[in-house]
Each structure stands twice: as C-alpha cells, then as structure tokens.
Amino acid sequence: MKHRLYLIFLFMIMISANNMDGVITGSATALSVQTLITYAGANSILGGAVMTAGFTMAAGVTVAWSSYFPVLGPVTLGTGTITLGRDFLMGGGSTFVNGGTFTCAGFSVVCPQQSTTFTLGGANAYTINGGSLRFNSPVTLNATLNLQGTTILDGGGNVITFGSSGVIAVSAGATVIIKNATLKGLMAGDITMGSAASNLTLQDVTWIQSGPLTLSTGNLNIVNDVLMTGSNIFTYSSANALSINSLSTLEFDLGMTFSYASATNSLLTFSSSSSELFLNGASLFAASAGLNLTTGTLLVANTSYLSTSSSISLGNTVSANDLQVNILPAAQLQVSNGTLNYNNVNAASFQMGSTGSNIYMGNGTILNLFQTLNLGTGNLFFASSTTLGRASGIQILGSVNILGDLAYASL
C-alpha cells in the first residue's frame, strides 16, 4: 500500500460537575475533558486535563497546575493558591471571578485575548509570586494586584486602567518589572512599595496620572522609554535611588510636575550620559534637601521649569561627572524659585539649540557659577531682584540680558 492510515485514539473522560477533595484531575498521558469542578481540598490538575467550563476553588485550598491546555470559562480562586508546574493559559472568554495566589516558580499566568477588556476584579486580592503575568488585551484593574518575589507584569502593549479599587502593590523585598504597558488613571495609593527593599522597574511604560501620586519608599528604575503624563504631580520621596539606565529616558510631559522630595540630594541617578531626564513643558521641583544632577543628560523642550526651596546643582566640578544639558531650539528653561548652581567643567556639556533657546532666571532667583557657562547661540535672561554669584575667573560667554535689578556675589 502506498498510503498508510494512522489512527490516534483520544480517550476522553467526561466528568460531571461535582466537589473534589484531595484528588487528581486528568492524566499525564491522555487527554481528558472536564466539566465544572469545585475543589474542596489539595488537588492536582495534570497535563492532559482540558478544563472546558473553568473551575472553582473553595476558600484557602491549593491546586497544583500542570495542564498543557488553556482553561476555558470562569475561574474562581476563592483566596486559594495555584502552584504552577507549567504556564497557566486562559482561553478566549475565560475570566477570573475573584482573587487568589499564583505560586509561579518561573512560569507565567497568561490572560486571554478579549475583544473588549479583561477585568481583574472581585473582593479578594490577586497575588503573583516568582513568575510573570501577561495581558493580551486591555485590562481594567478593580482589585489589589500583589507582586511578590522576582516577577514581571507584561502589558503586551495594552492599556491597564485603574478602577476605584485598583492597586498594584510591590511587596516587601520584591523585584518587579512592569513593561510594555500604559498605566491609566493613576492617583494616590494606586502604586505601593512594601519596604525599602522593594524594587520596581518601569520598562517601555506610559504612566498617565489622574491625580497626585507619591512613591515614598523602595527603589525605582527606568529602562528604555518611560513617559509620565497627565498634568499632575509625581512625588518621589523615597530614601532609595530613582535610577535612569543607559540608553533610557524618563520624560515628563506638558503640565506634569516631578517633585523630588528625598531627604538626600543625590538619589536621582544616571547610569551614563545616555540616561536622559526629559522635561517636555514640565516642571522639576526639589524640596528642602535640594538636588544634585551628575553624569546623565537633562533635555529641555517647550517652556520647562526648575524650582526649589534650596538649590539645584548641575555637575559637581569633576569633568567626568558633568551633566549634559541640552535646551532644544525654541525651548526655555525657567528657574522660577531658589538657587541654580552650575558646576559643569566642559564647555560642550551645555548646549543650546538655537538663538531661540533661553535660560530665564525668575524674580528673586540666584545663579551661582562655579565653572564658566558658555551659552553658544542661546540667551540668558535675568528678571528683577536676581543674583549672579561667580567663582574667581569664571565667566558667562554669550548673550546676557538683564531685565531688572541684578546683584553680584563672589563665591
């Protein structure tokens, strides 16, 4: 015979809806289709089990998951724990009824692709420990999402909208990456850090605030492009670092205020000159400790503002630590309050993009020059009641415009 016929027999065990306590669902070697099951004790769902109608867990029970197949239908976690031995895949139309814990051991919880939105809701919190949570459609977060251990939240390029009960909580000591996501509707308490040892990395994230938001503890890391927008105040008051990695940009969009309120003035750190803080029509405010910026790049577009109740320093008089300052064409950097200290050593570390690029020292502000400031083609303006302090032999090279009373001081 030229052709042979291969027959594959699939043994399908049909199990009706019932309560199961301390049993094994499915087989590791054969396919078995399961209807709705309620688990009342410690159970295992093996590789061949196809959960066609979802499943329900009684409060606090544990289920070990090893199925190769997406779960279909509603999943009621009941504050229980699912321990993953394989990725937990959710098929189209599958939903979470309420929260529980996934102990991932490096595996992933993969949410379904929906035509509209996928909702994490219910009265109970959801916990992802030591793996990843991946979204494949827009998400509405209406519950607390606890991220523990080393965990990745991958938005899949989708919008995660925070409802009135939506919270992302980075647990004490956790190392969490949120990537490829738009976080929409953020306000006070929507992102929390459990302790000083909590680490949150934002990677390719758009962060849209609907109200003021403060991070008061833990570490924040910026990777690739992170945009903060929404015409609100983002306050960083942690005693740990806010770090911008190499080849990465933290951008504050039009109308946003970045309030640096740490008790130490050197916790906004840059890995290299390719680490950018971009003020795009935004404001940078430094509280009473002030702010020292070294090593990275400050990029300015539109009319952006520096303000402090103390001082903001650019560079630290060590040439290798110069802060690259780039005021783009037609942009203005306006110092509206406090003292600006200029400590960059290299002339090339300060760039003004065109004759329309300006620095404007507002009423009552102070500019202290510890190194020579070369304006290039740009302009420096002094408003009324301003002060120019200069160290011995230090000059301003370029166009200076004095619009009111200017006092001079020796440094």
Image: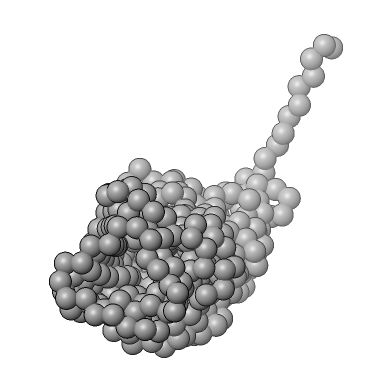
Q: Quadrant of residue 364?
A: bottom left
> Among all residues in the image, which is located at the extreme top?
2
Up/down of 257 relative to 184, above or below: below
- Image location of residue 38, percent across then percent down: 49, 66
Up/down of 187 relative to 73, above or below: below
Answer left or right for 208 relative to 371. Answer: left
Up/down of 182 relative to 40, above or below: above
Front one among 353 and 277: 353
Answer left or right for 243 relative to 389. Answer: right
Q: Residue 409: in sight, yes or no?
A: yes
Q: Quadrant of residue 255?
A: bottom left
Answer left or right for 62 relative to 343. Answer: right
Front one among 309 and 179: 309
Front one among 95 and 401: 401
Q: Residue 313: in sight, yes or no?
A: no
The N terminus lies in quadrant: top right
The C terminus lies in quadrant: bottom left
Report how many numbered discs are placed on residues in the image.
0
**Residue in the picture at 65% in, 58% down:** 86
Front one among 384 and 297: 384
- Image location of residue 399, percent across then percent down: 30, 57
